[in-house]
Image (cartoon, rainbow, N blue to C red):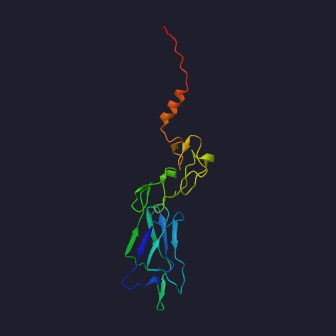
Amino acid sequence: MVNYLCKGDQGDDAQRMNGFKVYLSNTSTITSDNYLCYKDPYSPIGPYPNIIQTIPCNYLGKYVIYYDNIGSDESSIVYEPIVELCYVAINGCFKSAWETNCSDACPPKCIDQHCYPENGSCIWGCYPQNCLNNKCDKHTGACSEGCVTGLAGQFCNRNGNGMSGLYFITTVLQNVTCITTDYDG
């Protein structure tokens, strides 16, 4: 989540932000691999962007890049791009956590346990092993058609009877008939 407040010494000139873009990237430069998080719809006559915005940006990256290459036309004077940012807040969680205070763990089925900080849904999809027909919801990581035999739970990560694996061994041993013989070794 990217929150920003744009105010400068020249007043709250939203038209100076007209057509700006916000990228997320793993490098500090803009390349074709960057994720375009937001693009303001440029219009030479308005409406202009709000100077206070919250931009949801559901992507993993090391850098947030605010980019403006358009400039503005104020009072018949054409300006080069001007960036007037004085406050930018970037909110998120470390890998494998989500929720307002990053207090909840991402679903165990999310690939590499990456999930969106806002809602806990899987970013890259889910691991389908243990899911019936290898089908899991790519957003939640939950097995969408149920679990393979012997497993249970939303993510099919628990034994089907709710007991530990030791229960299965005990059950099998109860059905075994032991034959005892004398052994002279």
Residue 21 showing in the rendered view: yes
- Determine if residue 80 is in view: no
Q: Position of residue 154 (x, y in %)?
A: 53, 50
Instruction: Say if 106 sits above or below 7 in the image.
Output: above
In-front residue for pair 79/83: 83
Residue 99, horizontal then vertical, whole percent:
43, 60
From this viewpoint, which residue is outermost toward the bottom? Answer: 75
Residue at image x 59%, y 43%? 148
**Residue in the image at 52% along x and 50% along y:** 109
Q: What residue is shown at x 41% (from left), y 65% (from top)?
A: 91
Q: Residue furthest right?
A: 133
Pick the front one: 180 or 25: 180
Give the image location of residue 136, x and y in percent: 58, 52
Return the residue found at the far top: 184
Query: Based on the displayed image, in which of its 4 quarters is residue 100 positioned?
Result: bottom left
Number of labelled discs? 0
Q: Nearer the viewer, residue 96 or 167?
A: 167
Q: Quadrant of the N terminus?
A: bottom left
| Residue 93: % across, % down | 42, 59
Closer to us: 168 or 19: 168
Q: Is residue 183 above or below residue 151?
A: above
